[in-house]
Image: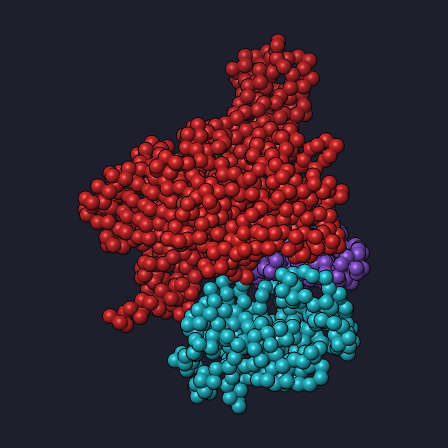
Chain colours: A cyan, B red, C purple
Amino acid sequence: MYATSYHRASSVGEAVNLRSSQEEGRYISGGMTLIATMKQRLAAPSNLIDLRHIGELKGISVEGRAVRIGAATPHADVAGSAALRAVCPAICNLAGMIGDPHVRHMGTIGGSVANNDPAADYPSAVLALNATVITDRREIAADDFFVGMFETALEEAEMITAIRFEAPERAGYAKFANPASRYALTGVFVAKFTSGVRVAVTGAGANGVFRVPEMEAALAASWSPESVAGVSVDPGMLMSDMHATSEYRANLVRVMAKRAVQAS
Amino acid sequence: MGMEGIGARVARKEDKRFLTGKGRYTDDMIVPGMKFAYFVRSPHAHARITGIDVSAAKAMPGVIDVLDGKQLQADGIGNLICGWMIHSKDGSPMKMGAWRPLAVDTVRYVGDAVAIVVADTAAEARDAAEAVVVDYDELPAVTTSLAALGEGAPQIHPEAPGNLIFDWQIGDGAATDAAIASAAHVTEIEIHNNRLSPNPMEPRATLGIYDSAEDHFTCYTTSQNPHVARLVMSAFYNVAPENKLRVIAPDVGGGFGSKIYIYPEEIVCLWASKKTGVPVKWTSDRTEAFLTDAHGRDHVSKVKMAFDKDHRIIGLKVDTIANLGAYMSLFSSAVPTYLYATLLSGQYAIPAIHANVRTVYTNTVPVDAYRGAGRPEATYLLERTMETAARELGISPAELRRKNFIRSFPYQTPVIMNYDAGDYEASLSAAMQAADWDGFPARRAQSEARGKKRGIGMSCYIEACGIAPSQAVGSLGAGVGLWESAEVRVNAVGTIEVLTGSHSHGQGHETTFAQLVADRLGVPIASVNIVHGDTDKVQMGMGTYGSRSGAVGMSAIVKALDKVEMKAKKIAAHLMEADESDIVIENGELKVAGTDKSLPWFQVALAAYTAHNLPAGMEPGLKEGAFYDPSNFTFPAGCYIAEVEVDPETGKTEILQFVAADDFGNIINPLIVEGQVHGGLAQGIGQALLEEVRYDEATGQILTASYMDYAMPRADDLPSFTLSHQNTPCPGNPLGIKGCGEAGAIGSPPALINAITDAIGINDLTMPATPLKVWSALQGSSMRMAAE
Amino acid sequence: MAKVTLTVNGRTMSGECDDRTLLVHFIREKLGLTGTHVGCDTTQCGACVVHMDGRSVKSCSILAVQASGSTVTTIEGIAAQGELHPVQAAFNQHHGLQCGFCTPGMVMTAVDMIARHGGALDEATVRHELEGNICRCTGYHNIVKAVLSANEEMHGAARQAAE
């Protein structure tokens, strides 16, 4: 890793100030992606602003069906939250599939969403749950948040403070892991609301996480695995690499969508 | 057997230090004044070096020096060697290109070392390495063996025209061709054996220490055979004479073959320590390990197996091309020849065999022995061919194998090996029973009802271990003898130190070797210490690889113990005024048979050292050494059965059961032997389902240089295994041991692929059978069916 | 340079290091606790697992400065000198280690796993929970056995104590 300077923030305001006043700064939360990237010298922020010690960024609140997850809440806490599991078990299950137990103890929902890795699990949940991304300065709808691979609507120095959503009637997540990295080769999150159905796919899209309107329509008509079994996704919009061709990913989108509905 | 003797399931003595964080690996070594190295490596697969500018790097913070290949050459450090001479069938010696520890004019694979930076910290060394400016003229690269042999392929070494290293053969070509011509049925198949990275969890590391006052070098290194490392570094690399070079391989975190070899880094760090005047430590990271640790396998073969009308094999013809990478590593030439083609008879009586092997240079990491080394390639080829033949002939795979088993011993194969003992039927029957082979159709129906495809497959393997008779391997081209040494030192208080040339890096020698002593002398294993891994302590040894430490290393200990016992009996007879021939050793005592006279072991030991009352003319002390040179290879064999379920929607394979029935001859410690099998199976299953080193064929860049892309077997990829042992003792060594370290990796890949191809009903499938590959195969077949 | 203060295995320890120094290197090189290992560069192998503030973490993917102020337990600190923790004893009894390099991370993982599951462990759960720890020697067979056996031992002991 290249040399860097570390700053520990104790409040959101302090963190944003530090970030704004430092050259080439990056926020670091759990650091489960950023530190690995820095070790490989693929990222070289001169300054790191640590968010892990900001109390106001942590914790899960469930009021009725309104859910709010603080940005610095580790995956393990999301996976293990009984209150959350009571209203939206799918997101708990998803959190329990991220990385491994040690990664889940450090990695956070805010960090994952802000990084928007095309193979990360959380973006599919945020998009399918029609969540609101709350930052230090505004609220961003999920549909507007994810711009492309590793790209989001976040401005320079803008920080995610929480993710908020209404728990759906039903939801499910199914993931097919990359045999090597265990990241999502394809992950599909399905969510059924009174207002309609949302289906979001991670790991597969050439432009990052995306929704599948045809599947949403089919599931809105009938919430069953068979509804999505016949819906195909255009391989032309999917990634292709040595682990999975775009045709294989297109197949996995369909199969994982089916299994996500089954799991709901 | 006693509670701790041969055959006892003793928990390992060495575990406590590993379990409490007190293991001492090379990277744990800290010496005063120690500095850190980072290697500047080629980013190109093939290029000419036109200039190296180290001035900016030398000015970086913490940098002590930056050294390159020209300086190394000027100091007379030699090129890396290959220790086994192979002659082509036209009689010409193998064509070996120069491998310089630091490249001077040409780099030949991504990762080829170009310069070394020594700095105060590892991070500063790496920072400065980025500031070394190397000018390259890029050359076209080639990564596959077939392409390297093609017209107009890039020429990698001037010494090897057309990149061909040797074109070698074994067996009787004419007889084999005649058998094929007269056959009732010929099974033809092309076999690919995928390229693997051994991946011991401890990355390689080395610490070079030069002492100018003594003009003496010490090398801590992650080695399976420190003595061979010293020999080679002295005799060929001109690092230092043997008496001025101490090599220590402390705790070593796994090897699997990859730590047999002497790599450029050991040599360069020792040399750099002398140049800079500071101890120099280098520790590989995982990416460097993928880029520089010798890879394994990478064969492409064409096979013809001929059968008579009764389904008896009458001939086997094999044409293999082996990719040896950019340079010839230490034992690279032996692996695809004498460790491979000599095993092509398998467990079967085959009257005519011919194999042709071509080895080629490519712009890839050098390829050498990896767990099994040649024998997995032979087994995979044979057992895939047998399975294919059974399917073509419409008979059961077990019946075809049974019909062709060798059933009387000794058996001389047409490819050098003389099998001394075995009972292949016993392992086959045991495996089929354990797997409930007969109940498979019902289980398959259950899977089908759940939309899954279930398959079962077997593999009957044989290997040649305990390498090896020195005279025999010498006549075949080996540069060293493959005996082993041992010294048994009985201390004055009766405790015992056993010095061995074998090296334990996970095998549990500190326990099993002590069990042997306990068995012989009746002393507790707690009073026996095993000393290994240090050239200053142990005189000379050949190290641990090829499942040889039991069959060869322990046989040397037996010989030394024989001498110790003989002397102890003489002393005891003298002290008890009995006849030497009446003395027996039991439960830690020397007794006069048939009387109540006895002396405890420690008292005899003490007598040897006080020397107050020894037989006339006897030298004081109780310490004996021995060298053991085996008379033959050993031939472990067995039968493995895999049962799998394939998810046709995703192509993912789940292993439902894996049964291993092995004949390792006599077993010292079943707990440890089982562990060896488990680990071997995991590696074999990894090869079959998950692992493959891949290159971009256009650029020669390695695509699988971390665990993000190279799929290592994890706990949830594997089942618990079902093991059993059959025992036909090896007649060739005093303990009847055959060896167990590699069997799992040798026998398992074909069982898996036979099971998966059985499940999906498609025989054409290469390793690793990834979900993508299996799903694609299923798509292809469903498309074909739709078209028909 | 930063000053890092940690409570490691019950003792408060301080040291100076670069901001970029990883926790694992701080533990190994500044504190001399070399039982914690580095086996990969990509947060996957788990040879570096320690407990930080009571949770298992990969010390190769945390800066020492990030950890400053926390309580860390390493493989050297889970049992009294000369004794074995029940997990360590089970690894020995069931031959759950060979070369020993991944072992400290495996043991620290198992201790955390057993604590989190409150005794409710089966083979499938153990295998899933070991996703972040790679062993190249054992094929995991005996590691799984050892974890289940230690779980039984510790859970049984806790049950007895409660009665």
**Residue B246, image x, y percentages:** 65, 34
**Screen quadrant of the N terminus of chain A:** bottom right
The residue drawn where x is 68% and y is 66% is A44
Q: Nearer the viewer, residue A242 or C82?
A: A242
Number of dots carrying numbers? 0
> Looking at the image, which is closer to me, B153 or B606?
B153
Residue at the spot x=67%, y=76% of the render? A71
Residue B600 in view in this figure: no
**In the depicted structure, whether residue C60 falls above or below residue B631:** below
Residue A194 vs B187, above or below: the answer is below
Asked whether, in this view, residue B432 is left or right of residue B560, the answer is left
Front residue (pair B125, B434) = B125
* Residue under the image location 27 percent in, 69 percent down: B785
Q: Name the residue at 38% across, 53% down.
A: B150
User: Which residue occupies the extreme top position in the image?
Assistant: B616
Q: Is residue C17 visible?
A: yes
Q: Position of residue B511 (x, y in %)?
A: 58, 37
Residue B227 spot, x, y in % from top left: 58, 34
Q: Position of residue B529 (x, y in %)?
A: 63, 33
